[in-house]
Image: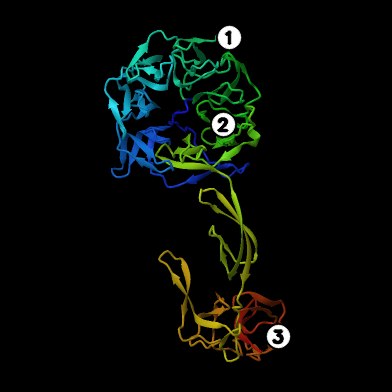
Amino acid sequence: MSPMKRLLQITCLFLVCFVNSNVWTQTYSYQEVNPYPFFETHRINALEGDVDGDNDIDVVLTGVFWDSITLDLDTASILYINDGNANFVPMPSFEALPYSDGVLGDIDGDGDLDLLLTGQNTQDLTDADSITSLLFKFNGNNFVLEPNSNIGNFTYSSSVLFDIDGDNDNDLLIMGQNDSLVPTTTLYTNDGSGVFSEVLNSGFVNVSQGELTVADIDNDNDLDVAILGVSAANQIVAEVYVNDGVGNFSTNSSLQLYTGIFYLSNSYINQFKKDVELVDFNNNGLPDLMFLCQNKVKMFSNVGNGNFIENNVALELFDDYFENGIVDTAVDNLAMYVEDFDADGDFDVIYDYRKVYSLGGAYGYNAIWGYKLLLNDGSGYFNHNTGTYLPFLSWNSVLLPFDADSDGDIDILNIMEWGNSWHNLFLYEPCNATYSNLIEVACVEYIAPSGIIYTQSGIYQDTIYNSKWCDSIITIDLTIQEVDVSVSVLSDMSLRANKNSASYQWGRCDVLVTPYGDEIEYFTPFSSETNQVFMPQQEGYKYGVIVSYDGCSDTSDCVNYYLGLEDVDSEGIKIFPNPTNGYVNFEFDNSKMYSIQIFDITGKQVYYSKTLESKININTYKNGVYFVKIYNDEYTNVTKVLKFE
């Protein structure tokens, strides 16, 4: 795939998909950077390159956009100019094709990049009249349509601009279905001003719905071609063409590329992602060859003079692609992206994958989709077992790798489509986690930088984003200072905050019932009640106190408050003394059997006996109101007992 271009149209056809974004095996990964002013899109082609010649990378999005004002779809192309710091400014929109491929390159020798779009205005593959090509020249501010390009009409295409004949201008090689719906590969020469002429009988295989790329495979200072596509007979074709330096190309007939490894039914052959890469994976100064189609990858090492040998051990890309032996050819639609992602001087690979985790569902299985980064060890070896699962949204999505902020590393634009609806765009930046330590002292509770609330002393690890939106891992040595907010009930039925020499604010605990039936508790302070002891004036309410001491404040539990105390219940059982400072006595009919439970003011059971005795010692209980429940099969009664010292 040309480094200037990534085709960004993909379709997800299965039912159950999940994003795998929280599995990490290396610290080197990506974090989301937001916001970015890319408009919502429905179906687009995305291109990157230094359009305006200012030494930073700009972005072109072309296709179908979602108009948030009209709430409708619009076909448009938009150039986003980069200021060098990943701040993108959209230029006025210009013509587009809703189904298109594109390439950026300098066609007129003025030092900036021009744009070629090929495609059609309808999704109907049989509509030959809708197939067209649009050539735009950059005028210093935006792209302007060139009315007479002399370039044929293509769809389901791939194109590359490169100098085939050593005259220092960009010529054009393009493959795709022409306006007669026939797979065609056509070579055009450029006169230096952007006027193209077709080269007849160029010798390239006629294919469409694939990919082509260029590199100097034989180290003779001209660019050669690798091509992968679908022929008119619906067969996968892969070829390498060597340039003689003046624009004549020939194949190496001894090079066996894809012979015998594919069988794709005619129904599905055109749905699969097809990719070809020519880059130096093993750092020997010669570009190696990698092909991708369906879930199969072939890699060939360049041994010089345009000769390749198949490398069966260098790449373990798809060992974890399928589990349970399930392969459904209707939905295999992979993509891979090759760049130096970790900036160590060799080419790495990101690929999207699918893992079947259970059988069942509408398509016979349930699956996880995601992206995985495989780092090159420098010799051209990739081991999927040490790969990194990336946080990019994968279902119906593709990636555009480029250096967005001019810092020398590869950022990634993740373009996703949810449920065949709208794309959202996210920019990611490679990063490593940073580490720091904090010593914190807090009152009652502590809110960590991430927003997590801690109420106990201890050592905690917290994670936030740093200034580059990478993980910042903070170790917090935390001490929580607590305030005694316990409350006692005195013999005169007043309430006393047990913490001495503090500040106090008494109030009532109220409950608000929302129209939806939810209960919301809130505290209503009594402005004049600021002493340590508080005498409530009403029975049947809950009261509490805010205690402030040494810079810390906390609120007590709410206390149910009752005034009257009973000595004799309805069955004649006498309970005394009430109030009491130690023992509670019971007088009752010994011919009857009773059980007894005692509950504190919060409703917690503090005592139980299957048989009621004549005396119970509650001397160790805290001061306050208790509820004594005496019962048998025919009788139940609850009496309030006040305990104080």
Q: CA distance from mark 2 to mark 3?
A: 75 Å
For the residue labelled by badge 3, is the local secondary structure a helix, a strand or a loop?
loop
For the residue labelled by badge 1, is the local secondary structure a helix, a strand or a loop?
loop
Of circles 1 and 3, the one toward us is 1
Quarter-of-image position of residue 359: top right
Q: Which mark sits nearer the N-terminus, 2 or 3?
A: 2
What kind of residue is marked 2?
Answer: Val
Using the image, determine if residue 517 lies above or below residue 473: below
What kind of residue is marked 3?
Answer: Asn
In the rendering, at what x and y percent does residue 417 appear? Answer: 43, 38
Local packing at callout 1 (Cα closer than 10 Å; few below 14, some 14-19, many 20+) is few
Q: Mark 3 highlights which residue?
A: 619
Q: Is residue 391 visible?
A: yes
What kind of residue is marked 1?
Answer: Ser
- The residue sitting at 57% across, 68% down in the picture is 445
Local packing at callout 3 (Cα closer than 10 Å; few below 14, some 14-19, many 20+) is some
